[in-house]
Image (cartoon, rainbow, N blue to C red):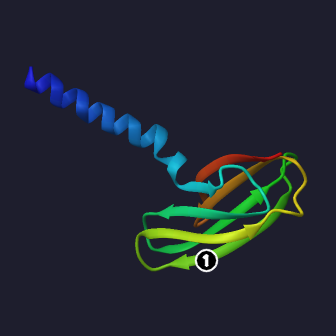
Amino acid sequence: MNKKLILFLMLFFFFTKDNYGQENKIKISPNNLLGTSSILLTLEDRGKYSLTIKNKSGKKIFIKKFEIFEKKLFAFKHDFKNFDNGDYTFELSSKRKIIANKKFSKN
């Protein structure tokens, strides 16, 4: 019984990390793009990163490059007043590899 429970918990942790871990890397507060919003990025490793915002046609409309020196939350504010209503894709990348991808809307 204990072995089955331990196996279940290990599998749950493994699949939860793979399926839902990415979702927590990019957060917007408030949850939709209104005026000035805070962008929170959860970063696990030191290094150089890039956050790219693309509109619904895939055109890059904002790029922010930064470097971190320890595991932490990286936060900054961005003014979305000049963005048109619609969906936007936020891509967090490091070393030319996308590590998180999330969509947000502006209504």
Instruction: Please name whichever residue, 2 or 31, is drawn nearer the observer in this view of the structure.
Output: 31
Mark 1 lies on residue: 66
* Residue 54 falls left or right of residue 20: right
What amino acid is labelled 1 in the image? Phe
- Residue at image coords 83%, 50%: 58
Which quarter of the rendering shows the C terminus?
A: top right
Q: Secondary structure at mark 1?
A: strand
Q: Relative to 72, is 86 above or below?
A: above
- Residue at image coords 51%, 48%: 22
* Residue 4 falls left or right of residue 42: left
| Residue 44 point in image, percent of width and height | 43, 64
Tag 1: Cα neighbours inside 10 Å, few (<14), some, or many (≥20)? few
* Residue 75 falls left or right of residue 30: left
| Residue 65 point in image, percent of width and height | 66, 75
| Residue 74 point in image, percent of width and height | 53, 70
Q: Relative to 10, is 102 above or below?
A: below
